[in-house]
Amino acid sequence: MMGQFDRVDRFFTFIIKIISVVPTILILILMTIVVSPSFW
């Protein structure tokens, strides 16, 4: 599957990047909430 369909391959790579980035964003949000409670 990978490499044969260029468009599908790019699409899946994009989804994998988003999935790998989302936990980092959630951790950053949690850190912001913990470090600065006055933020809310």
Image (tube, rainbow, N blue to C red):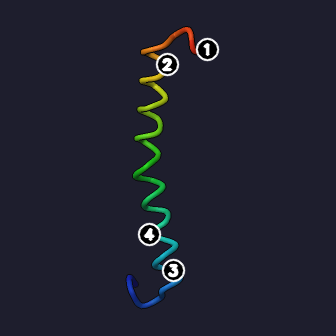
Which numbered dot is residue 13?
Answer: 4
In 3D space, how far apart are the residues under numbered discs 3 and 2 (Cα atoms)? 38 Å
Residues at discs 1 and 2 in contact (Cβ within 8 Å) = yes
Instruction: Measuring from the top left, give residue 26's x and y in whole percent.
Output: 47, 35
Q: CA distance from mark 3 to mark 1?
A: 41 Å
In this rendering, which labeled residue sits more in front, label 3 or label 2? 2
Residue 15 point in image, percent of width and height: 49, 62
In the picture of the structure, the residue carrying the numbered disc 1 is: 40
Question: Quadrant of the image for the N terminus?
Answer: bottom left
User: For the residues marked 1 and 2, what is the alpha-carbon distance in whole angstroms?
Assistant: 8 Å
- Identify which amino acid the numbered label 4 is placed on: Thr
Amino acid type of the residue tagged 3 in the rendering: Val
Label 3–label 4 contact, CB within 8 A: no
The residue to which callout 3 is attached is: 8
Measured in 3D between alpha carbons, the distance from the residue under mark 1 to the one under mark 4, in whole angstroms, is: 35 Å
In the picture, the disc for residue 33 is 2
Q: Amino acid at mark 2?
A: Ile
- Per the image, label 2 sits on a secondary structure element best described as helix
Mark 3 packing: few (<14 Cα in 10 Å), some, or many (20+)? few
